Image (tube, rainbow, N blue to C red):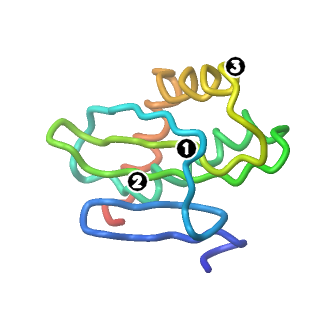
Amino acid sequence: MARKGWHILKDEGRVTVTRRLPVRFDLSVEAELPCARTVSLTRVAQQVRQDMWRRLQDLRGFAPAVEVSRSEGGLVIRAGGALADPVTGRVRDSLADLLESPAHQARWIAHAGRRSHG
């Protein structure tokens, strides 16, 4: 168990931040971000998790999970998590809007670039 009840799982080229184990993605949205290879995957995952939680915290039984992995062009972010109730189109659209937001993406990358490991 990591800081404040969050599990941080690290594999080669991939980091997953989750509230519960095993990791479940009942809700799952992916986005690709072009970026330098020096950004911290853990810091990107934590930033996405925080913004996702702010947006979806009213969902009953929601347990967030974010997976960030390296790709040829930058990063692939998979965000979502476990849900007590079925996923609605509104929830999926809200999360997709967050992941595709240029302002959020720029902030995540800027924050993650402050340290080069993880």
| Tag 1: amino acid | Val
* Above or below, comparing residue 118 to residue 28 in the picture: below
- Residue at label 1? 48
- Under circle 3, the secondary element is helix
- Residue at label 2? 114
Earlier residue among tags 3 and 2: 3
Q: Residue furthest front?
A: 86
Q: Which of the 4 image quadrants contains residue 93?
A: top right
Q: Which of the 4 image quadrants contains residue 58?
A: top right
CB within 8 Å, label 3 to label 2: no
- Around disc 2, counting alpha carbons within 10 Å, would you say few (fewer than 14), some (14 to 19), or many (20 or more)? few
* Above or below, comparing residue 93 to residue 24 in the picture: above
- Under circle 1, the secondary element is helix
- Quick one: quadrant of the N terminus? bottom right
Mark 2–mark 1 distance (CA, rounded to whole Å): 16 Å
Q: Residue at x 39, y 51 (%)?
A: 68
| Tag 2: amino acid | Arg
- Residue at label 3? 90
Q: Nearer the viewer, mark 2 or mark 1?
A: 1
- Under circle 2, the secondary element is loop
* Above or below, comparing residue 63 to residue 22 in the picture: above
Name the one closer to the observer, 22 or 49. 22
Percent coordinates x, y for residue 75 in the rendering: 30, 42
Q: Residue furthest bottom?
A: 1
